[in-house]
Amino acid sequence: MITSRRHRFIGVIGAFIISSGLFAGTALAQGAGQTTTTIDPGYWTVTPFVGFGFSGDLDSATPDIGIAGGYVWSPRVSFEGEFSFLPSSENSGLVEVSTRVWNLTGNVLYHFSGRDWVPYGVAGIGFGHSSADINTSDPFLNSFDTSSTEFVANIGGGVERALRNNTALRGDFRYMFGGDLVPDFWRLSVGVTLGFHRR
């Protein structure tokens, strides 16, 4: 299982590097006057978001909250740093399991042409951390704690809709690749992007 995850992770890293090069090359080839991002180039952005993680290594849908900060580099390409957190607690009789997962990633967003709704593709890499606390009434087991920090990657896409004054609504769908105790899962989220300070 670890070997297959490692191969999958290496494949994702390769795809990320290739797609980043293609995105950057395509962005440079576009006309300077063509605007596709919902926030003007040269603006810094902040995007708080909420959603849920599901499937993959997750047993059930889990709430997900986070925030992304970034920079709109060109009419098509944006860069973002993102922090997200998935708290979870499950109780099955004698055993209560509390897990916490957080991811810190750097992402590249490529915006395609659109009208009211602007679609985008996204890929990123970073670090993920998972911890599990198992509490039981069994005196021999008492409590068990474990944690792991791993390299992670994500790939996906979404849509943005400009609201007004460099503000946009965003819907996002990604697959998060983890490792060891850091789970793989799908994430569906919605957020509001705010643009600040033209350079």
Image (tube, rainbow, N blue to C red):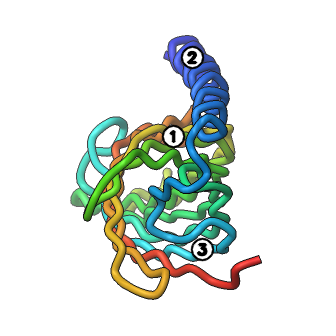
Q: Which mark is residue 45?
A: 3
Along the line of sight, the residue nearer the viewer: 89 or 58? 58
**Mark 1 — residue?**
154
First in sequence: mark 2 vs mark 3 = 2
Indicate the position of residue 14 as horizontal and vertical percent values.
63, 19
Q: Residue at x 51, y 40 (%)?
A: 154
Q: Nearer the viewer, residue 173 or 3?
A: 173
Q: CA distance from mark 1 to mark 2?
A: 12 Å
| Distance from Cα at disc 2 to Cα at disc 3 | 30 Å
Q: Secondary structure at mark 2?
A: helix
Above or below, 12 against 83 in this view is above
Identity, as a three-letter code, of the amino acid under mark 2: Gly
Query: On the image, numbered disc 2 is attached to which residue?
Result: 11
Disc ID at residue 64: none
23 relative to 199 in the view: left or right: left
Occupied quadrant, residue 75: bottom right
Left-right relation of 151 to 47 = right
Tag nearer the camera, 1 or 3: 3
